[in-house]
Image (cartoon, rainbow, N blue to C red):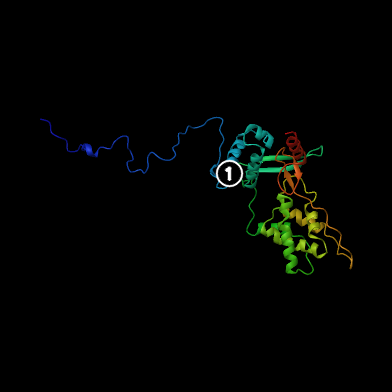
Amino acid sequence: MDTQNPSVPTHAHIRVATKKHPNRRNPHGGLLHDNTRHTTRFTVIGNHLAQHPELSLLAIGLSVHIQSLPAGSRIDIKSLAARFPEGTTHIAAALRELEAHGYLRRTRERVPDGRIITRTTSCNQPGRSRTDTPVPGPGEADEAARRQTSPRGTRPACPAPALLQQATDLLSRLRREDPRLLLSTSDTAHLTPGVAAWLERDVTPAAVRHALTTDLPPERLHRPAALLAHRLTAQLPPPPPFGARQAPPPPTRHPLQTCDGCDRAFHAPEPGHCRDCRAGRTELLEAA
């Protein structure tokens, strides 16, 4: 007669093979991944893009597509609209989203024939530079920035609070003329006395803006505050003679925009279509 082995667990205590984690909540709900490791034809995308809290789904998908393309590919609005069904208006808006969050850089360059074209650079991780730069010691960075952004010897004789506030407001609005002229709080504070010195000499705010934003170089501005400081110092006008009439302000110069239809650079107060694209759309509507 066989004897029972007391060390063998009873059937009530045997774990069912198909339920390895009986205490897991909702075992059949939620996302599951069936992943296979890629060895060719793949693109690494950061979660900062794929799970971006502010970008639209179209902008995220468009950035993924752009990052997967080889260098030299055409990613102008017309080419993207021919590839995808969303149309030029939605694609242009998505490109502006990516540009605002640093995933795209679009710079205007003047080519030998005189035309202004748009160069587009895709950034897979905004804010990271490809080149290593030496780290300045304590206080060296602030002192270097102060030397570069302070207009030397350009200060108002009577720095009234209202005058300084007007100069500060003028500097904060320069980015409307050119997005590259976005200044930090520190740069604005160092440049304010120089602008106030111009205003104190009966130069209108429009004339100051014109002097600071006209004929800027087409390439990227690495130190816009230093460029403005140089112009405030080098172009400081002399004090007007007593009783002289003030010259009329120059005409308003709108910032450069990128056409939503052909990617051409043109001056306008807000994004949209250039003159040729507007004319073409009008002809199509009249023909219809």
Residue at screen point 22% across, 36% down: 11
Q: From the viewer's perspective, is 78 left or right of 253?
A: left
Circle 1 SS class: loop
Quarter of the rendering occupied by the N terminus: top left
Residue 244 sits in quarter: bottom right
- x and y percentages locating residue 272 in the rendered image: 71, 43
The foreground one among 250 and 46 is 250
Residue 138 sits in quarter: bottom right
Query: What amino acid does circle 1 point to?
Result: Ser
Q: Give the answer, above or below, for where 102 lies relative to 187.
A: above
Q: Report the label total.
A: 1
Query: Within 10 Å of the Cα at label 1, are there few (<14), some (14-19), or many (20+) other Cα atoms?
Result: some
Residue 116 sits in quarter: top right
- Residue labelled with disc 1: 56
Q: Give the answer, above or below, for where 142 lies relative to 285.
A: below
Q: From the viewer's perspective, is 66 left or right of 235?
A: left
Quarter of the rendering occupied by the C terminus: top right
- x and y percentages locating residue 119 in the rendered image: 71, 40
Please say whether residue 91 is visible from this viewpoint: yes
Q: From the viewer's perspective, is 269 left or right of 52?
A: right
Q: Give the answer, above or below, for where 242 lies relative to 129.
A: below
- x and y percentages locating residue 42 in the rendered image: 56, 33
- x and y percentages locating residue 174 in the rendered image: 73, 54
Please say whether residue 122 is visible from this viewpoint: no
Residue at screen point 60% across, 41% down: 59
